[in-house]
Image (cartoon, coloured by chain):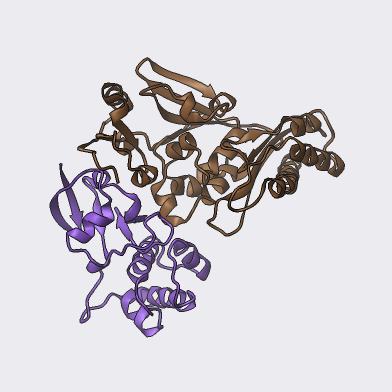
């Protein structure tokens, strides 16, 4: 069937099997920042924003996103014009292997969109569904707090 | 992934959803949050029915009770200020203890209570709060008490083409207290044991008590022996300890990957004791 979605502000029509996993559709359509990690909703590597809310694309069926707005990390910024979250992740050393990073950035973006002045506990809570096996989280949390500060000023 | 799903339908109201389910029978699969459907690979399913656009995500307040739409997301339950004011916020606490933030953003009240997954904590609180459950099917709507709804697995209580549409939470006056506690290995792991208690006091004596245990069987259950000890008594520490010990004796616990049945029974006494003490303390503060 055909479904109508908006991905990173761009309206699109996709031909899908409604029972396909959204993660598979996104990667097939070229959004390779969305990663397959555990495939069962535990790790957060496949996080995307649906209407601004962080969700697992491995636990969504394609049919469910008809009419919805999807945000992937491709929309955040690029090498020449990085989003404050992206530059603070680099500056704080919050990226090591990088596999969890797109999910971390999107969960952080959802938090800052909702609450521009989070404290450390709120950052930890917002990232509770994103696992990182390299950094130990400390630098990621520092990076989110630094980005929040920069975005306010 | 559902390999044979050909179409996804988006009913605009509960009656339309029921009509579609009635027409398609076992080939239709209801989606609310969709997390369980995504993990299914049932080849019989050809038609998906997305309930999230059927106007069932509202929260309404009347004089006697609150009505919660079945498609409310668990995160909305966890953070809604009105729900935080009911039974000392025990439903908010139960909702906040479900999984991680993205899971709470996806999963719904209805999916959580109909499926009673191992990660479903809200049913424990709802049974203790004596919530009401509105089911809508081809013959119209009927309302069940929490005891009726959780008497068996709710999937066996629902008739063909019937869906859970609303959950009702009554407003309690006077000296009442509610508490929920989940004990798990990590913040987002499944409960080893979770428990909830609601008490209502009449002067110094306990007028009503509901003590509920989750995590030990497929559906939450009331610890009737513990309740009998509390009701009519003055709630001293000794009485509360006796009730918690009674809950342990009436526990039939499943073993499993995380822990064995004996450890679960031991923990029932600890956790039930904790929620009884907390609920009683909150009720006494209001009397």
Colour of chain B as rendered = brown
Looking at this view, name the residue that lies furthest to the top.
Answer: B139
Residue at 44%, 30% in the rendered image: B166
A152, B38: nearer the viewer: B38
Residue at 50%, 29% in the rendered image: B154
Q: Return the x and y of residue A4 as percentages of the image width and height.
A: 16, 47
| Relative horizontal placement of residue B22, taking residue B108 as reference (left or right) | left
Q: Quadrant of the N terminus of chain A?
A: top left
Q: Is residue A120 above or below residue B11?
A: below
Q: Quadrant of the C terminus of chain A?
A: bottom left
Q: Is residue B161 above or below residue A132?
A: above
Q: How many numbered dots are placed on residues in this image?
A: 0
Q: Return the x and y of residue B26 as percentages of the image width and height.
A: 32, 27
Colour of chain A as rendered = purple
Residue A8 appears in the rendering: no
Q: Return the x and y of residue A11 as percentages of the image width and height.
A: 14, 54
Q: Return the x and y of residue A150 as percentages of the image width and height.
A: 36, 78
């Amino acid at each position: 069937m055909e479904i109508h979605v908006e991905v990173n502000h761009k309206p699109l029509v996709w031909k899908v099997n409604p029972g396909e996993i959204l993660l598979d559709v996104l990667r097939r359509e070229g959004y390779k920042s969305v990663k397959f990690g555990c495939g069962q909703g535990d790790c957060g590597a496949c996080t995307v924003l649906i209407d601004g809310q962080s969700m697992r694309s491995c636990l969504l069926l394609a049919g469910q996103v008809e009419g919805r707005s999807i945000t992937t990390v491709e929309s955040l910024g690029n090498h020449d014009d990085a989003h404050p979250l992206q530059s603070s992740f680099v500056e704080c050393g919050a990226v090591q292997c990088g596999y969890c990073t797109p999910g971390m950035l999107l969960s952080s973006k959802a938090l800052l969109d909702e609450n521009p002045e989070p404290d450390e506990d709120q950052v930890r809570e917002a990232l509770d569904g994103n696992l990182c096996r390299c950094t130990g989280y400390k630098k990621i949390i520092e990076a989110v707090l630094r980005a929040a500060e920069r975005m306010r000023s | 992934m559902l390999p044979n799903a050909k179409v996804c339908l988006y009913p605009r109201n509960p009656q339309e959803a029921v009509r579609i389910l009635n027409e398609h029978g076992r080939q239709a699969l209801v989606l609310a949050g969709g997390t369980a459907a995504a993990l299914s690979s049932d080849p019989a399913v050809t038609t998906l029915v997305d309930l999230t656009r059927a106007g069932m995500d509202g929260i309404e307040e009347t004089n006697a009770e609150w009505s919660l739409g079945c498609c409310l997301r668990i995160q909305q339950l966890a953070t809604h200020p009105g729900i935080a004011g009911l039974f000392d916020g025990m439903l908010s606490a139960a909702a906040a203890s479900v999984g991680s933030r993205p899971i709470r953003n996806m999963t719904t009240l209805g999916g959580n209570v109909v499926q009673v997954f191992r990660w479903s904590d809200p049913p424990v609180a709802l049974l203790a709060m004596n919530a009401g459950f509105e089911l809508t099917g081809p013959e119209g709507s009927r309302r069940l008490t929490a005891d009726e709804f959780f008497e068996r697995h709710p999937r066996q209580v629902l008739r063909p083409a019937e869906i859970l549409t609303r959950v009702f939470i009554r407003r309690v006056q006077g000296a009442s207290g509610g508490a929920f506690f989940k004990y798990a290995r990590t913040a987002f792991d499944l409960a080893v044991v979770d428990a909830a208690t609601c008490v209502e006091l009449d002067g110094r004596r306990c007028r009503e008590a509901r003590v509920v245990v989750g995590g030990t069987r497929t559906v939450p259950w009331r610890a009737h022996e513990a309740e009998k000890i509390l009701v009519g008594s003055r709630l001293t520490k000794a009485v509360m300890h006796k009730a918690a010990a009674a809950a342990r004796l009436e526990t039939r616990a499943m073993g499993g990957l995380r822990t064995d049945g004996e450890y679960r029974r031991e923990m029932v006494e600890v956790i039930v004791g904790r929620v009884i003490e907390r609920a009683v303390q909150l009720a006494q503060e209001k009397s």
